[in-house]
Image (cartoon, rainbow, N blue to C red):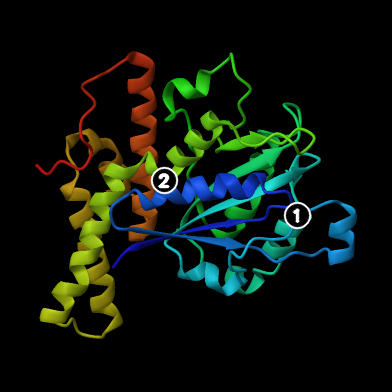
Amino acid sequence: MATKVYIVYYSMYGHVEKLAEEIKKGAASVEGVEAKLWQVPETLSEDVLAKMSAPPKSDVAVITPQELAEADGIIFGFPTRFGMMAAQFKAFLDATGGLWRTQQLAGKPAGIFYSTGSQGGGQETTPLTAITQLVHHGMIFVPIGYTFGAGMFEMEKVKGGSPYGAGTFAGDGSRQPSDLELQQAFHQVQGSSSVSVYFTKLKDLWPEYDSILPPPSSKEYADQLEFQRLLQILMGLNDSFEQARGQILVMPNVPTINQAYAMVIHDESRRSVGSNFLGNSGYNEPTAMQ
């Protein structure tokens, strides 16, 4: 079973959509990941959009709030409006009350990407203010951090993005995402491929095992099986993940598999940042079996 990553975005002039397409390429480059683009509904009329010189929408499917629950992980993208997400995207999230009541998005990893008009237009405040939406749903925010390496420290070229996620500058609308900005967008999901591949391969094996020896249908057994599979994931990681593994195992409330996965991805990103700063060429392969 493939890991489903949904890239859900709103784009009026195409800048966010270009980043979304590159993020999809990055996600699809990871073995076992199925990436899909979605647009959120437009709230403005055709007449208003025409007066704003907005181009026609692409043929990317429009998502409903309930379809978010199908994803294993979600990357949200939007342009900024006065340092916050555009109203169209906020309106979509405002319609997710049913998912919030049932906490169907709790534990799912989530990322953010965005577009602003200028350097002072919200490259950090836009994702920062958007995190509140993830928190109320119990989602786990997975930032890009500094895992993009030297690209994060580029000073000679105009480049959007921040440790919160990939970004671009739209200017007056004529500027399109640069090659460096697109590379950062590609990296946002692809950069954690090693743990992602390991996690996906294990998930693919479980249905095969269940088809050979179907498990009992009781809830008690299902909870026990979930815990066994969590241990299987954690014990398969090499010793470089010893601290993260220990922290997960001593948590008073046992996390779900998706929550544990997000914590391991965060730990991998943190250590990757350290290796970039220190020039450590001996960074251990995170999914090496013992």
In the rendered image, residue 238, in percent from the top left (x then y), is placed at 17, 39
Residue 273 horizontal/vertical position (percent): 39, 26
Q: What residue do we see at 32% from left, 64% from top?
A: 2
Q: Tag 1's secondary structure? A: loop
With 38 as the anchor, is 125 left or right in this view? right
Label 2 and label 1: CA atoms lie apart by 26 Å
| Residue at numbered disc 2 | 26
Q: Closest to the observer: 41 or 222?
A: 41
Query: Which amino acid does the dot numbered 2 rest on?
Result: Gly
In the rendered image, the vertical position of residue 244 relative to residue 207, given as above or below = above
Three-letter amino acid code at the position of disc 1 = Pro
Residue 133 locus on image (x, y percent)? 64, 54
Q: Quadrant of the N terminus?
A: bottom left
Classify 10 Å Cα crowding around label 2: few (below 14), some (14-19), many (20 and above).
Answer: many
Residue at 16%, 80% in the rendered image: 211
Alpha-carbon neighbours of circle 1 within 10 Å: few (<14), some, or many (≥20)? few
Can residue 102 be seen in the rendering of this structure? no
Report the quarter where the C terminus lies: top left
Q: Nearer the viewer, mark 2 or mark 1?
A: 1
256 lies left or right of 215: right
Which numbered circle lies on residue 55?
1
Q: Kindly indicate the quadrant of the structure image that contains residue 51.
A: bottom right
Q: Is residue 287 visible?
A: yes
In the image, residue 259 sits, relative to residue 191, either above or below, namely: below
Q: Relative to the observer, which residue lies in front, 240 or 35?
A: 35
Work out whether residue 288 or residue 114 is closer to the camera in this orientation and state it. 114
